[in-house]
Every structure is written in C-alpha cells, then in structure tokens.
Image (tube, grey):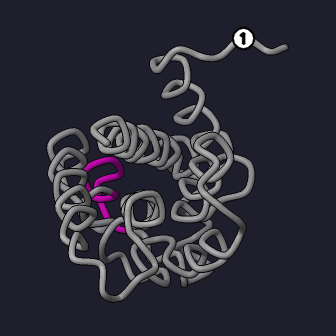
Amino acid sequence: MAQELSREELLDKIERTAHDYEVKYHGCSRCVMKSLLEHLKLGDGSAFKAATPLAAGIAMKGETCGALIGGIMAVGLALAKEDIEDENWMEPLGAAYRLWRRFEKEVGSTSCREIQTERFGRFYNIADLKEYEEFQKVGGYVECPKVVGKAARLAAQMILEQTEKK
C-alpha cells in the first residue's frame, strides 16, 4: 500500500505537476486545473475542458491570469454545492477572494499582461503568431510555468484549509 503524502509533499507535487504540464502542454488555466483534479480528486474532466479557453489571460487577451482562474475554478469545484438554493454559497466565493489576494501578494499582480510585463519587459500577444514565437524565445515557458505552479499550490492550500474546517 502506498504511503500517504504529508500536506507539504502534496502541495509540492501539485505545484510541480502544474508547472510541468505548462512546460510540456501549455495552457495555464487547464494545467492548474488538471493538476488539482488529479491530486485532490475533484471530479471528472468537465472542469478541465471548461478551463481550457481561459488560458493566457482569458482567451489569449492578457486579462486576468489564466492560472489564477483555473485555481479559482477548482476552489468552486471543491467547495460549492450544485444546489442553487444553497444558503452557504458565499463560502466558496470568500475562499476565491482570499486566493485572489494571496496570488496577488505572491505573484505581484492578477493580470496576465502585468505579469508578463514584469517578467519579460513587455506583454506578448500570443494570439499573434510572431509575438507567440517571441514569447517562446524570451522564456515564456520558463517563467509562466513558475506562475502556474504557484497558482496550483495556492489553490490547493485554500481548498485544503477550507475542507479541513468542516
């Protein structure tokens, strides 16, 4: 029988998996979601599919960081109920807010555009093939995977904190 991981080992594994998925497969929002789905056993692949077009700042627009969005989606998946009449619906909303704040504090921004500018000196519009090639050349898949791993770790921490309270 496999030995159970400590909380810290689990968080390290989630962070590493999300990071490695971003390096190999790309799509920050889906890489965060996939790692959290796998390691926290959050459900089927529907959320992974829903997270996919939110990458690169929502549909490659440089808006809210896709890695953060993937993490927030996982918080909802783990904590929210499917019942529209659930009177505790603000609980996952509050957890998502706290995740947002932690991410902003640790990464420096929640904006894909600002995160790229901080790391690369400018924003790369990856919807444009030439800019996408430049993004790759300047280390886009060296720096962004770090953010992806951090987002997955922070989301997992929030989920674990909230589920341990219950």
Measuring 29% from the left and 68% from the top, which residue is drawn there? 113
- Residue projecting furthest to the bottom: 84
Q: Position of residue 85 (x, y in %)?
A: 30, 87
Label 1: which residue?
A: 3
Looking at numbered disc 1 in the image, what kind of residue is underneath it? Gln
Asked if residue 137 lies left or right of residue 165, the reply is: right
Give the extent of the magenta segment.
116-123
| Secondary structure state at the residue bearing disc 1 | loop
- Residue projecting furthest to the right: 1
Measuring 42% from the left and 69% from the top, which residue is drawn there? 124
Q: For mark 1, does the 10 Å Cα neighbourhood hold few (<14), some (14 to 19), or many (20 or more) residues?
A: few
Q: Position of residue 26 (x, y in %)?
A: 65, 59
The foreground one among 25 and 130 is 25
Q: Position of residue 53 (x, y in %)?
A: 56, 81
Residue 73 lies, with reference to residue 121, above or below; the image says: below
Residue 50 visible in this rendered orientation of the protein: yes
Measuring 49% from the left and 40% from the top, which residue is drawn there? 149
Residue 115 lies, with reference to residue 6, above or below; the image says: below
